[in-house]
Image (cartoon, rainbow, N blue to C red):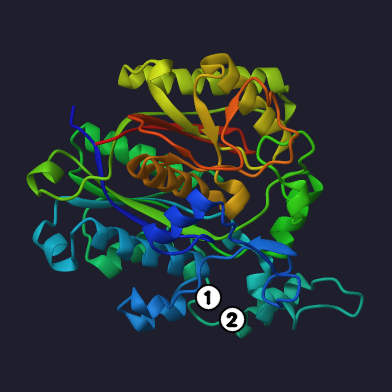
């Protein structure tokens, strides 16, 4: 079994682009959630907009931008940042054709019907219904020939390989909002078992669309009211939404031979799925989360008391957060610090887990635990060691990153300071 190291990190999130942007925001509790009520590009009142950046600064093939969705642009740009951060370039990658791979998590917003607006607007009947015969025979002609390409779930992974001349293993995880962090977990397994030497992995999420957001809001999963979204909040009503991308370069022991700056070691991973998630009660969900965490620690031979802090999944979903809080309490009690980044970024869906992981590494290597948003009404507030109001200075060896989503997917990754 190989050792697995994170050698490069690229994050484009509502907190910024550079590691310095994220470290400052995390340490000083600077939110990236913006009031978008007057912005015609965003129909939500409050939204985590990815930092203002120019994709042309990162993607050399300018023609490719024309066939990229927002998700793919974010993912490809973050990948370029991560590759550079790992001390690599395209020439180095090209020299090592068999050593490089891409495992990436697909975003969930690309399936919107709104992206078909040019075809739909000519296929609406006088009573407001879609004439599907007309749409199939004539309406589709209003779409550009390559319209479907950026909406395929594996386009981002494909474009990362194309733009960076990566010719090894390439596949996409398509499993819901946890896609990105599961992709990193699968990359960990591929490196550890010797199948690959270096993998570019992570997830990206583009702009939220109204037709996908609305049913999630009806189900109490999302909200655009900042007062209704507090991680671990007793009165919280759902996630705030956001867009972004987080990519890591993961390598085997060759990273040590390259004498590159190693950001962290990945030592444990576990993921599971809860069937019929919406039919399960909180107690049952909590037990499964607890098991997922415990098996992650066991896979690395690490005890609960060795964990410095938990980078929690909590994003404001009342059931998920209550179940996660209960699992943390059962395993760690008040001994381990707990925080979440989602009151600053919103939930970035496929990019959420990778962004949490990247931020956990930033905190671990810079000796602090970031505070999280709160309203004094948190699950087990007096029993769990939540980090509130101010960052906590600390020196920790192990950090647990949780990522639990509303489809029933549960994923944990254990990081070790290098």
Give SS at disc 2.
loop
Q: Label 1: which residue?
A: 147
Quarter occupied by the N terminus: top left
* 138 to 339, vertically: above or below: below
Q: How many marks?
A: 2
Q: Would you identify the image quadrant in which residue 115 lies?
A: bottom right
* Residue 106: image location, x then y, percent: 48, 53
| Label drawn at residue 143 | 2
Q: Real-space Cα distance between discs 1 and 2? A: 6 Å
Quarter occupied by the C terminus: top left
* Residue 371: image location, x then y, percent: 56, 42
Give SS at disc 1.
loop
Q: Residue at x 31, y 65 (%)?
A: 80
Between 77 and 233, which is closer to the camera in this rendering? 233
Left or right, 276 with respect to 194, comes to right
Task: Assess whether mark 2 and mark 1 are in contact (beta carbons under 8 angstroms).
Answer: yes
């Amino acid at each position: 079994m190989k050792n697995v190291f994170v050698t490069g990190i690229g994050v484009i999130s509502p907190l910024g682009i550079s590691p310095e942007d994220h470290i400052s925001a995390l340490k000083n509790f600077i939110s990236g959630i913006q009031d978008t009520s007057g912005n015609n590009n965003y129909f939500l009142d409050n939204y985590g907009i990815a930092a203002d950046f120019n994709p042309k600064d990162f993607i050399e093939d300018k023609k490719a931008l024309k066939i990229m969705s927002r998700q793919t642009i974010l993912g490809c740009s973050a990948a370029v940042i991560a590759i550079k951060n790992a001390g690599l370039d395209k020439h180095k990658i090209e020299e090592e054709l068999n050593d490089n791979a891409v495992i990436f998590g697909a975003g969930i917003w690309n399936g919107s019907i709104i992206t078909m607006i040019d075809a739909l607007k000519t296929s609406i009947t006088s009573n407001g219904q879609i004439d599907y015969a007309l749409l199939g025979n004539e309406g589709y002609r209003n779409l550009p020939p390559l319209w479907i390409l950026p909406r395929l779930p594996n386009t981002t992974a494909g474009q990362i390989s194309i733009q960076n001349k990566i010719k090894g293993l390439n596949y996409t995880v398509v499993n819901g909002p946890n896609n990105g962090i599961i992709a990193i977990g699968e990359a960990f397994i591929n490196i550890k078992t010797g199948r690959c030497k270096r993998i570019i992995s992570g997830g990206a999420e583009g702009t939220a669309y109204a037709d996908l957001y609305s049913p999630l809001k009806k189900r109490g999963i999302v909200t655009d009211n900042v007062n209704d979204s507090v991680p671990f909040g007793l009165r919280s009503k759902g996630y705030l939404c956001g867009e972004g991308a987080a990519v890591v370069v993961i390598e085997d022991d060759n990273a040590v031979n390259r004498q590159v700056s190693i950001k962290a070691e990945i030592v444990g991973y576990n993921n599971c799925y809860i069937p019929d998630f919406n039919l399960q009660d909180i107690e049952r969900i909590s037990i499964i989360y607890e098991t997922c965490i415990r098996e992650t620690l066991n896979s690395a031979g690490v005890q609960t008391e060795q964990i410095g802090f938990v980078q929690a999944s909590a994003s404001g979903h009342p059931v998920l957060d209550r179940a996660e809080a209960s699992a943390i309490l059962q395993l760690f009690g008040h001994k381990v610090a707990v925080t979440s980044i989602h009151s600053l970024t919103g939930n970035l869906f496929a990019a959420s887990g990778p962004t949490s992981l990247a931020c956990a590494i930033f905190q671990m290597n810079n000796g602090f635990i970031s505070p999280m948003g709160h309203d004094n009404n948190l699950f087990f507030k007096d029993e769990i060691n939540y980090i509130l109001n101010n960052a906590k200075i600390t020196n920790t060896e192990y950090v647990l990153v949780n990522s639990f989503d509303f489809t029933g997917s549960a994923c944990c990754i254990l990081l070790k300071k290098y």
